[in-house]
Image (cartoon, rainbow, N blue to C red):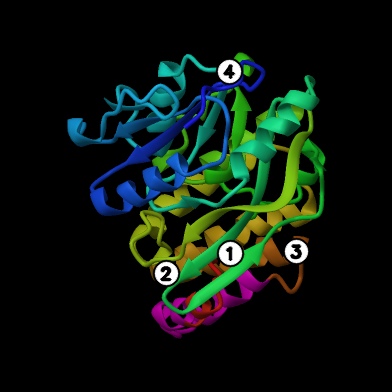
Amino acid sequence: MSVPEVSWPSVSVVIPTRDRPELLKETLDAIRAQDYPGVLGAIVVFDRSEPDPSIVSDDPLRPVRAIANSRTPGAAGARNSGAVAADTDLIAFCDDTDLWLPGKMLAQATVLTDSPEAEVVCCGLRLFGPDLEIDRSIPLTHVTHQQLLGGHMPQLHPSGIVVRRSAGLLFDEDIPGSYGEDYEFLLRAAARTPVRNLPLVGVGIRWHKGSYFSVLQNAPLISSAVQWLLPRYDFTRAGFAHWAGKVAFAEAVQKHRGTALKWAWRTMLKRPLDARALLAVVVALGVPPSFIMKVLDKIGRGV
């Protein structure tokens, strides 16, 4: 491997991890394989578990550090622990289930190098699983705060986020369970300057049933986190409906029929045929939520 060019910014990839050693290895291998000519290190943050010294590397171009989450338990605290520990020009993020695809880091670093006013750059993603491979991206090169207030853009995944360390941006650790902390992070970032975006499909998102944010296992958490988020921003009608519909479905999963129908009604006042609200009504009327999630899983969709 050649000596890094001084013109390329150094990068730390923060990887929160928890009890996924085999998947973590694949994530690290994909980062090491990037054709990035500068220093591209990894800071693996072990959340509620002991750091594994066997993954540490002092390779000058692809160093790996293993640290413990010293902040709030969960994704937000783990990401912040890594970001604070980073001493590089750029900080990138990648979940321990995801894989960077060829060309990702070089393309994003080029944007930040060529545009000194930019602070954050994202990219497109590929959902993949045993019977699934779907590419998703948005055509926008600049994503504004107002556009993000229109609702979550799942194409802007945390595993595709790269930020200048000098921006001082951290994730909000007050969000219950760190649910939606990446979206809230982008809302604050875009309020400062538009988030840059590449249509390039740069990260593979593993579509799996072991997600810590499965609505079937974590409906109370999702409902609580979204209700934390809603009053803090002046969402558009569509944006409010997007999030309120999630509350409606989460409440329906918990068999809180009255609350679910109330949130479904609030959602449909903003967007009459909102899919999440309609699904919440169906579940509130007795259709098993597991059946609905099984159908959505087949097409790579969540609620």
In the rendered structure, are the residues bearing label 1 and label 3 in contact, judged by CB atoms less than 8 Å apart? no
Residue at disc 1, secondary structure: helix
Residue at left 55%, top 22%? 4
Residue at disc 4, secondary structure: loop
The magenta-colored residue range is 275-294
Residue at disc 2, secondary structure: helix
Q: Amino acid at mark 1?
A: Lys
Per the image, the residue denoted by label 4 is 89
Give the x, y percent position of residue 268. 71, 67
Q: How would you rate the neighbour count of disc 3 (Cα within 10 Å): few for under 14, some for 14-19, many for 20 or more?
A: few
In the rendered structure, are the residues bearing label 3 and label 2 in contact, judged by CB atoms less than 8 Å apart? no
Mark 1 vs mark 4: which is more N-terminal? 4
Mark pair 4, 2: CA separation: 44 Å
Mark 3 vs mark 2: which is more N-terminal? 2
Residue 68 visible in the picture? no
Q: Amino acid at mark 2?
A: Val
The image's mark for residue 172 is none
Mark pair 1, 2: CA separation: 14 Å
Residue 249 visible in the picture? yes
Per the image, the residue denoted by label 1 is 262
Mark 1 vs mark 3: which is more N-terminal? 1
Per the image, the residue denoted by label 3 is 269
Mark pair 3, 4: CA separation: 46 Å
Establish if 99 lies above or below 114. Answer: below
